[in-house]
Structures are given as C-alpha cells and as structure tokens.
Image (tube, grey):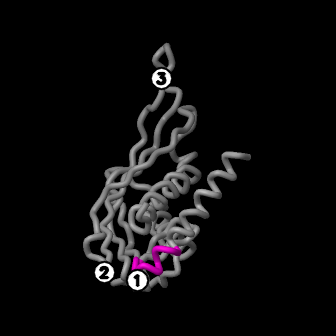
Amino acid sequence: MKKLFSSLAFRFSLLLLAGAMSGCGVAVKYSLSGASIPPDAKTFSVAYFPNNATMVSPILSSTLTDALVDIFSRRTRLTQTEEGGDFAFEGEIVNYTSVTASVSSDDYALLNRLTITVKVRFTNAVDEKASWNRTFSAYEDYNSTKLLTEVEGELIPQIVDKIVTDIFQASASNW
C-alpha cells in the first residue's frame, strides 16, 4: 500500500511540476496516459502496414494497423486523418517467425516463440527533430505441443499490443 501511495504521490508531483512549467512557457501537454503531445499537433495518420516477412499471417497487417489507430484514438486528443497527420506513421512488418524457445534435457522442444518485428517511420510535422525510423519487436512463447495455426489468433493480439505500446511511448512520450 505504501508503494502504491508513493507512486501516486510521485505522479501527482510530476503533474504539479508540469503545471508549474506550463506557466513558464514550456509548450508540452501532459496527460495521465503518459502522452506528451505538442499543443499544435491536432491530427494523426496511420498508413496500412503490409506484411513483407517471409512467413505471413493473414490477420497480422490489419491487427497491427487497427491497434495503432486505436491506441492513439483512446490515449490522445488527436483526430485521425487518412494521411498527412501531424503525427504520421507508416512502415512494414519485416519479421514473423516461430522458433524453438526451450528444449528439454532429452532434446525435445518444450516451448516455441512467435516473434514479430515491425519497421516504423514516424513523422512529427510539428517538430521534425522528434521524427524517427525505428524497428520494434516483441514475442510470446507457446507450448510446443500446439501448432502455430492453433495459437496465433491469441498470440498475435498480445504481441501487437506490446509493439503498439512501444510505438506509442516512442512517439508520444518524452519521459
């Protein structure tokens, strides 16, 4: 309970500090979601992320694209536009692989690992210096007794959630 109280007190202190700084000419808006969006930014756009990996899942591109739109719609005040947003995202899925992650003492696979890697180009039209090109990757392990086709419907959203959270933090947070 003390740890929770300390964490809340720390966040409240940060909000107070941010409020005090806004009176000193700092042009950044802070929110409880962790987003730090310049006040001049009004829109965001997300281009479709094609799956250019060697192995392809039919649901991956749309799941990733939709999740990126969803996180910015829910956690920011930005309005979605088809293209040319103040915060613009484009990229491609470059890796979708399943490999053995854990082996038993008698050389049998125990766990497999599904890994997804995405190249992202982020353009910040309000502050060009904040634009970047980065690669994001995340994985989930699954029981080797199951086929990838049996578990990917569950694993893809979990992995995509990790990736879009990382993209969100990289583009909308200055922590």
Q: Position of residue 162 (x, y in %)?
A: 49, 54
Q: Which residue is mark 1?
A: 41
Closer to the chain start, of discs 1 and 2, is 1
Q: Which residues are magenta?
A: 19-27
For the residue labelled by badge 2, is the local secondary structure a helix, a strand or a loop? Answer: loop
Query: Marks 3 and 1: which is nearer the front?
Result: 1
- Residue designated by label 2: 125
Q: Amino acid at mark 2?
A: Ala
Q: Quadrant of residue 57?
A: bottom left
Q: Residue furthest right?
A: 1
Q: Residues within 10 Å of mark 2 (few under 14, many from 20)?
A: some
Identify the residue position indicated by label 3 in the image: 103
Q: Residue at x 48, y 76 (%)?
A: 29
| Residue in front for this viewpoint, 52 or 127 | 127
Q: Mark 2 or 3 closer to N-term?
A: 3
The disc, 3 or 1, on the residue closer to the chain's N-terminal end is: 1
